[in-house]
Image (cartoon, coloured by chain):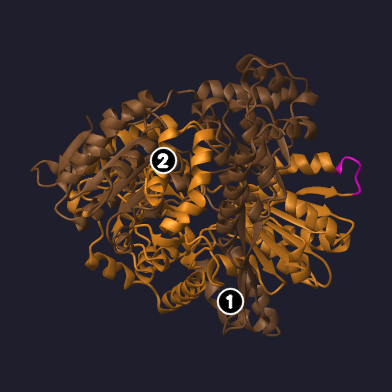
Chain colours: A orange, B brown
């Protein structure tokens, strides 16, 4: 049974706050292990990478075998069915079209004092994308990470994907090809992150690392942060559905279950002012759950973290959604645009019953790498901006310096930074013919 | 004596790489101490905050005294001279004008399949700005952090500034007032960061924390990251000047010294193809150094980390600058715009001899919070974007779902996520009248 809450309960606020602060992740402390692996890679490069791949992935490689060759990639991708290739190509095209619109503008202007000011964006020179192996090896994630990097203009794009026991997911390689990835290495875990950050004889280091991974990968990304840039550290996924009006309970139940099947730590929340609809959806979830191949995972998530909240009205639902700041927010109501205006914190909003969250995972176009665990209050999904950096520009004329320089001298003096003041003063003196 | 390098030296590359990897910061491991302080604040709120402020700042407060009152702020800011107030006001206006142009656009469009896609930006609801006390208490940093937050539309803006022994910097309070800060608390250190992240009886928690601080503050920001958003963790400051042509050696020397006087760990680098100019600048640095009030700090920085590099030409200088990815890049050459085009990684570029870096610290308009320690390869200075988050939007019509839904079903199946597929399939079936 999921948790049932009702905003008319006298202790609702306490119970809702408790629900929000439920710890859904048991992060093992792997920091020492990971620090050791990183030190090994830094000290011994390829040799350590090969040893660790043998140990963790039961795969014997030599340095030449670390990278997939063009021929190997072609042989694997040739096994992909026409239908899968078409679906992946459609997804890649739509993701590319969406992200192309995210490219920010450079700006340059001259202000009334004659100062020419502005900024310019430039791509990160090289990026590394981590792709998990095994069950969580998702070709869609390859597209979602690699395409924004390519749109941003990243010069060199590298993938590390472990192939435990030599098992390769051909769709991952095809997704890499569709996205225009330059190099693919069959290494994983903290050792792959260390190789991307510090480089080995075979793998040149990159400037930015993105992509999901297990606790070791997450810890490694945290540890190399600063040496390289990283994206967010994602937690378990979540969906919050606000529903009212004529809605198909089966659709809503499947949307809740789609979230739950990701992971036993995932969370599905339904908020509605309509008790009958809530009951119908819950009944559908219970009916459909046993039919799922991933019933064990989805069932654990639903029992442990599934939540149904009855509200007085939609305004109350929107306010609760803002407190949860969900990764995915589905608005299955008569006027989803109006309700969207009343919410302020969500990674992605899916408007109306014809927009199931699952289309957003694959083909609608927006990125599926989104802020979890209430971090949508202060952070955003992956975008081309994650692969760009901005340089600010300033060019003063003598006249501009004469106009604003004295204020800089004054402030430098007030902060006790005399050389700052002198560096401006020397120029002002030259202007005054001193 | 600073380090002298010459690109014609046979071992130049090794020596340049060594220079880049010099460790300029001895970060004390304060993580355990900080974790203890955060736990105290979480457990005991105001009481712990008051005790820690007594212990570290030798200041006795009660809960009502944690915040500066309106009257206290007015009394302190009334002591600021007319000249200082005018300079700070000019700086605030120019910083506001620059950052106002950074506001990104919301987008919404309908694609050929009938999917309505887009995104919208919204401000972080509340932000906390840390301001160091004592010597490094810079009113300019208050403006550089608070104004972008206000421009972004942050609803509630809070400052924490320690006042050791009760000493208050009136310019910090005035800067907060000019920037439109809502609440100012006289607390500092890790305890202030913990209070901002978790809240106490008096201080409501915020969603994002920015601002510089010592090792304890930096460690606390790292530890609360995830609970709240943080800006970058800044390292020691640096300037790289590329010079050629008719340049005043005194101006360049003062620009190098302005960087060096910040901190003994700061770094000033001069790159030029002109040996005579290099010698003249170094001589000026040596002549001017003893005249500085902060000669000890600037001298330590210059001796330890100051670097002068002779190159064959400006192209070589630009390539070396890209490897250093400096926080501040000054281009004192005949055609600075052309040279700027040849560089790709820098936090801020100052074009031409009339644009000393010091004007950028105060009044030119761009932010002075910039990526250090080569992180300009992958990150950017503080901007309004740091106080905004983007929500992606998608709304499908039945026709759009019919067009792209089948590909989502296919990809969900290939990833073994059957409920994902079913959630789309159920809608497609309804469309087909099944």
Residue A350: image location, x then y, percent? 67, 67
- Residue at image x 83%, y 42%? A13
- Residue at image x 81%, y 49%? A4
Residue B357: image location, x then y, percent? 41, 46
Mark-to-mark CA distance, 2 and 1: 37 Å
User: Label 2 marks which chain's residue?
Assistant: A
Q: Who is closer to the viewer here, A102 or A374? A: A102
Q: Which mark is residue A220?
A: 2
Q: Who is closer to the viewer here, A152 or A194? A: A152
- Residue at image x 60%, y 39%? B84
| Residue range of the region highlighted in magenta in the rendering | A8-12
Q: Is residue A394 at least partly visible in the picture?
A: no
Mark 2 vs mark 1, foreground winner is 2
Tag 1 residue: B405
Residue A395: image location, x then y, percent? 41, 58
In reply to whether residue B279 is colored magenta, the answer given is no
Q: Which mark is residue B199?
A: none
Q: Is residue A18 left or right of residue A117?
A: right
- Please tell me whether mark 1 sits on a helix, a strand or a loop: helix
Query: In the image, is residue B53 above or below residue A254?
Result: above
């Amino acid at each position: 049974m999921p948790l049932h809450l009702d905003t008319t309960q006298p202790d609702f606020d306490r119970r809702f706050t408790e629900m929000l602060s439920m710890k859904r992740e048991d992060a093992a402390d792997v920091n020492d292990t990971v620090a050791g692996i990183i030190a090994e890679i830094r000290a011994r490069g390829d040799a350590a990478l090969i040893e660790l791949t043998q140990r963790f992935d039961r795969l014997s490689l030599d340095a030449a075998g670390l990278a997939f060759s063009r021929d190997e990639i072609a042989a694997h991708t040739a096994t992909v069915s026409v239908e899968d290739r078409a679906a992946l190509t459609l997804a890649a095209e739509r993701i590319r079209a969406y992200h192309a619109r995210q490219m920010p503008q450079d700006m340059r202007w001259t202000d009334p004092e004659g100062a020419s000011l502005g900024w310019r964006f430039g791509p990160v020179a090289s990026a590394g994308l981590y792709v998990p192996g095994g069950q969580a090896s998702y070709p869609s994630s390859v597209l979602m990470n690699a395409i924004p990097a390519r749109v941003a203009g990243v010069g060199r794009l590298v993938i590390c994907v472990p192939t435990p026991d030599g098992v390769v997911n051909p769709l991952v390689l095809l997704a890499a090809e569709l996205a225009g990835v330059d190099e693919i290495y069959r290494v994983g875990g903290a050792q792959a992150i260390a190789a991307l950050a510090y480089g080995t004889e075979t793998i040149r280091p990159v400037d930015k690392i993105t992509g999901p991974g297990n606790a070791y990968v997450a810890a490694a990304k945290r540890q190399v942060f600063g040496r390289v840039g990283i994206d967010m550290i994602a937690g378990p996924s979540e969906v919050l559905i606000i529903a009212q009006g004529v809605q198909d309970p089966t659709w809503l139940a499947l949307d809740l279950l789609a979230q739950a099947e990701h992971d036993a730590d995932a969370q599905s929340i339904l908020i509605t002012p309509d008790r009958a609809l809530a009951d119908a959806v819950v009944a559908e979830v219970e009916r459909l759950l046993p039919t799922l191949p991933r019933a064990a995972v989805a069932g654990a998530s639903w029992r442990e973290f599934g939540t149904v909240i009855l509200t007085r009205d939609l305004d109350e639902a929107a306010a609760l959604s803002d407190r949860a700041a969900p990764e995915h927010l589905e608005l299955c109501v008569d006027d989803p645009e109006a309700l969207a205006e009343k919410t302020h914190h969500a990674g992605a909003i899916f408007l109306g019953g014809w927009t199931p969250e699952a289309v957003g995972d694959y083909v609608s176009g927006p990125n599926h790498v989104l802020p979890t665990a209430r971090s949508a209050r202060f952070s955003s999904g992956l975008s081309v901006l994650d692969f760009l950096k901005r340089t600010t520009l300033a060019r003063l004329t003598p006249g501009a310096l004469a106009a604003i320089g004295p204020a800089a001298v004054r402030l430098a003096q007030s902060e006790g930074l005399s050389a700052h003041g002198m560096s401006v003063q020397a120029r002002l003196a030259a202007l005054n013919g001193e």
